[in-house]
Image (tube, helix red, strand yellow):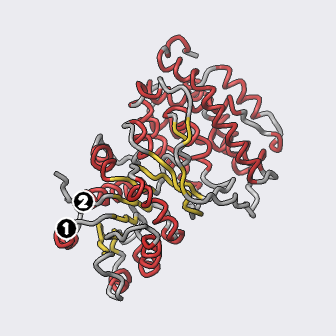
Amino acid sequence: MVELSTIPEQTKQQIEQIRTVDLVIGLVDEDAGQTMTRIAEVVREGLARLTKSVRAVVLHQDAGANAGTALQNGLEDESLRFLSYAPAPAHRSIMLVESIVAAYRSIGEISHKLGAKASVVVASSPEGLTAEWIYGLAQPILERDLDLAAPCYAPNKFEGLLNSAILYPTSRALYGKRVVNPLGPDFGFSSRLLQSVLLDSWARGPGARLPLVAPEAVLRGLKVCQAHIGKRIYPPLDWKNLDSILAEVLDPFFLGIERDAAFWQHIRSSEPVPSFGDSLPWTEESVPVDTRRLLEPFKLGFRNLREIWSLVLPPSALLELTKADRLPPEQFRIPDELWTSIIYDFALAYHLRTIGRDHLLRALTPLYLGWSASYAIEVETLGGAAVQRRLERLCIAYENRKPYLVSRWRWPDRFNP
């Protein structure tokens, strides 16, 4: 039985009146109510592309008078309804991960209660929402009987670097499926995936953790695909809290790796998943990246965190980092083999609790910024096709280096630095 404990009472009553729908579209961003008229148009346009008409509900956080006024202007009919699943906070004081997890849970609970065949969660900024997003994430579930539609965004060589550097290549090497954005954050998923995996995993364990949707689906043998949905508007980089953001994202990711070790140790290679929609060309970055700003935290970390790094990394890796630190800024490089070993060593240290997990993940931030500087210097003058080949080489390096992680995971004492 799904309890709607966090849902406003008025919404509970509306759910009882609606009874069942085909599709639930959940908007995570608390400002979505400010643009509800445009969102309604986008949703209708996306649903019109489906081969059959569907009954849909759009869930949003109550943004006050503006949302209410918009919903009174003829946006609703029998095929499309709007519900508020939570009051929007008066100010953004809630931690990002906590608010996202709470939104996912509420959307999942309502979708389950309404018996929806498919759910689409949009956690990115609603400013970038298009009909292609709605159609791309809903159609594989409703019309192809798949369980998960992960997003493929229009690529940009200097956006989504945490995904390019760690999340995608690690997930690909370990779980064996080439899901480009394994943590979304925008997804379409079936009622099968929601009921058998997500509601259980979101309620499992203490604290708020980002949902590991794609790894969970792969682990359960469910049918996974990805959809090309267009450009994503990325939030501005919060330099002051970058270590906290990195820890919040990697904590559940590394925890999943620990939990799923019996599964991924037997995966020998990766394979593509079905992809739908038209891929867009790489978008060029007009503003040059300040690599010196990336290198400063790395060099500061090299001076102040070497003792901690020495508890995690073998002497050979520390020697390679020493060589990189001595290079002129324009020649700075972190080779793929070194970088993949660093991530695998940190995943192992997380598992072994070599040091406190939060402290460990924060100690990775200067290394991540060092990799980002190395990557930016290398691809600065490259076109989209060349950047794609460069990132593919990194993914292959993760796959080739996987036996190193498997060996250290099984026999950590044998490899004790």
Q: Mark 2 or mark 1, which is nearer the start of the sequence?
A: 1
Q: What type is the residue that disc 2 sits on?
A: Gly
The correct choice, above or below, for 70 with respect to 167 in the image is: below
Query: Which residue in the protein does label 2 denote?
Result: 115
- Which disc, if any, is residue 19? 1
The correct choice, above or below, for 392 with respect to 411 in the image is: below
Question: Which of the two residues, 320 or 74, is positioned nearer the viewer here?
Answer: 74
- Residue 158 lies left or right of residue 227; in this view the side is right
Neighbor class of circle 1 (other Cα within 10 Å; few <14, some 14-19, many 20+) is: few
Q: Position of residue 158 (x, y in %)?
A: 68, 54
Q: Position of residue 235 (x, y in %)?
A: 55, 62
- The quarter of the rendered structure image containing the C terminus is top right
Q: Secondary structure at mark 2?
A: loop
Q: CA distance from mark 1 to mark 2?
A: 8 Å
Question: Which of the two residues, 318 or 81, is positioned nearer the viewer here?
Answer: 81
Where residue 82 sits, quadrant-wise, is bottom left
Where residue 351 sits, quadrant-wise, is top left
Neighbor class of circle 2 (other Cα within 10 Å; few <14, some 14-19, many 20+) is: some
Determine if residue 10 is in view: yes
Q: Residue at x 40, y 76 (%)?
A: 33
Question: Which of the two residues, 153 or 366, is positioned nearer the viewer here?
Answer: 153
The correct choice, above or below, for 285 with respect to 311 in the image is: below
Where residue 336 sits, quadrant-wise, is top right
- Residue 173 lies left or right of residue 32; in this view the side is right
Q: Position of residue 316 (x, y in %)?
A: 68, 20
Q: Secondary structure at mark 1?
A: loop
Determine if residue 34 is in view: no
Q: What type is the residue that disc 1 sits on?
A: Arg
Q: Residue at x 72, y 33 (%)?
A: 335
| CB atoms of marks 1 and 2 within 8 Å | yes
